[in-house]
């Protein structure tokens, strides 16, 4: 089917309208008209080919909310007119041990990413949600509760699941003490979700500038990382620290904040993390770990949880033709909300 999206034609180039063809629906496919698409910092890295595997033309976008306009003959979960959601993956082998556990993000054969990834069947390069339509295997489309505001739901498909997955993996609940480093799109969702799980939540930031926002969305305390005395007083104070900083940084500042057997989990930085002093790790049996997105089962779980608890990302709604300005803003600042494009402004 013919559609249109915003694409980069080469590394580092501005995104501009690009007309292209989506594949015809297979028997197990869902075809959606995209209503909203969130903007992730990953999209900037991919535009610039920072990780070396981008394919051009490149239509980014893996936080997708849409309406079903066609279903394949074998589809059972959706009918025309239903709303659906697509995150960072659109396929996997479905046969390996990890896929069978619901961990498609760890598929032994490699999952198919929503964009800039070879399709498992025909080898065509996938294109993402900065577009009017998308065709996705039914198993990788999540259902949406009527309780969710569709205009603010899309970031749950990336920022939400990326912070939800470690909260679930490390069994965070009412007796847990959680700290969140960074107050951007990932950080503010981590605060909301950890708080809703009943944990005591501390937001860590470089200054007091975002304290009011942090406390408003659910943080119980605020810790300034540049205040040496305050940081020392917080030593041994947390069971889990979610680190959302998207660039290389000094982890030694944060590791001593962990209690015995505590874990600092990196969810933001893809690439070098920097050296880590082994003494605090050994002396406290502390861990530094990494966590990507979650699987489809966990993604559906966090969508349903957000519907029950009335949790929504803080969003700024923009038109698709404002995408390049939004990228500039994201590159300059760690903003406590997520940009979301209203795709009704995009016409084939």
Image (cartoon, rainbow, N blue to C red):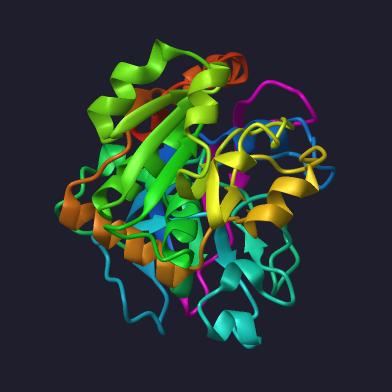
- Judge by depth and name the residue closer to the eye, 103 or 348: 103
Can you give x and y, in whole percent of width and height, for residue 3 in the image? Answer: 52, 44
Residue, x 59% and y 47% (percent of image)?
Answer: 267
Residue, x 60% and y 55% (percent of image)?
Answer: 292
- Judge by depth and name the residue closer to the eye, 250 or 24: 250
Count of all numbered marks drawn on residues in the image: 0
Is 41 left or right of 145, judged from the image as shown? Answer: right
Is 36 left or right of 311, judged from the image as shown? Answer: right
- Asked if residue 2 lies in the magenta stretch, the reply is yes
| Above or below 45: residue 20 | below
Whether residue 213 is visible, yes or no, is yes
Q: What are the residue bounds of the magenta stretch?
A: 1-28
Can you give x and y, in whole percent of width and height, for residue 130 in the image? Answer: 52, 38
| Above or below 173: residue 95 | below
Residue, x 56% and y 64% (percent of image)?
Answer: 90
- Asked if residue 263 lies in the magenta stretch, the reply is no
Whether residue 186 is visible, yes or no, is no
- Judge by depth and name the residue closer to the eye, 257 or 289: 257
Can you give x and y, in whole percent of width and height, for residue 253 in the image? Answer: 65, 31
| Above or below 236: residue 6 | above
Residue, x 48% and y 55% (percent of image)?
Answer: 87
Can you give x and y, in whole percent of width and height, for residue 66 in the image? Answer: 35, 51
């Amino acid at each position: 089917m013919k559609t249109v999206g915003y694409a980069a034609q080469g590394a580092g180039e501005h995104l501009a309208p690009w007309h292209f063809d989506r594949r015809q629906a297979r028997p197990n496919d869902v075809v959606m008209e995209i209503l909203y698409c969130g903007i992730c910092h990953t999209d900037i890295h991919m535009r610039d080919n920072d990780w070396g595997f981008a394919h051009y033309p490149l239509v980014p976008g893996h936080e997708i909310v849409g309406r079903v306009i066609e279903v394949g003959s074998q589809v059972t979960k959706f009918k025309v007119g239903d709303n659906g959601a697509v995150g960072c993956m659109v396929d996997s082998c479905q046969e390996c041990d990890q896929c069978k556990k619901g961990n498609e993000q760890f598929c032994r054969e490699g999952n198919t990413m929503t964009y800039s990834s070879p399709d498992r069947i025909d080898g065509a390069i996938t294109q993402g949600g900065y577009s009017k339509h998308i065709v996705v295997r039914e198993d990788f489309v999540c259902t949406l509760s009527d309780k969710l505001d569709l205009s603010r739901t899309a970031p749950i498909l990336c920022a939400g699941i990326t912070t939800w997955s470690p909260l679930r993996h490390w069994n965070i609940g009412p007796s847990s003490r959680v700290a969140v480093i960074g107050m951007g799109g990932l950080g503010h969702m981590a605060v909301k979700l950890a708080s809703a799980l009943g944990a005591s939540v501390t937001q860590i930031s470089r200054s007091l500038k975002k304290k009011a926002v942090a406390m408003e969305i659910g943080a119980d305390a605020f810790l300034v990382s540049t205040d040496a005395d305050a940081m020392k007083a917080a030593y041994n104070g947390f069971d889990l620290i979610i680190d959302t900083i998207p660039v290389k940084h000094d982890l030694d500042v944060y590791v001593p904040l962990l209690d015995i057997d505590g874990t600092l989990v990196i969810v933001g930085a893809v690439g070098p993390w920097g050296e880590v002093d082994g003494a605090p790790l050994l002396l406290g049996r502390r861990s530094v770990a990494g966590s990507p997105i979650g699987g489809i089962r966990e993604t559906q779980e966090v969508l349903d949880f957000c519907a029950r608890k009335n949790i929504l990302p803080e969003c700024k709604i923009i038109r698709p033709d404002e995408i390049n300005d939004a990228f500039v803003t994201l590159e300059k600042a760690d903003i406590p909300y997520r940009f979301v494009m209203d795709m009704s402004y995009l016409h084939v």
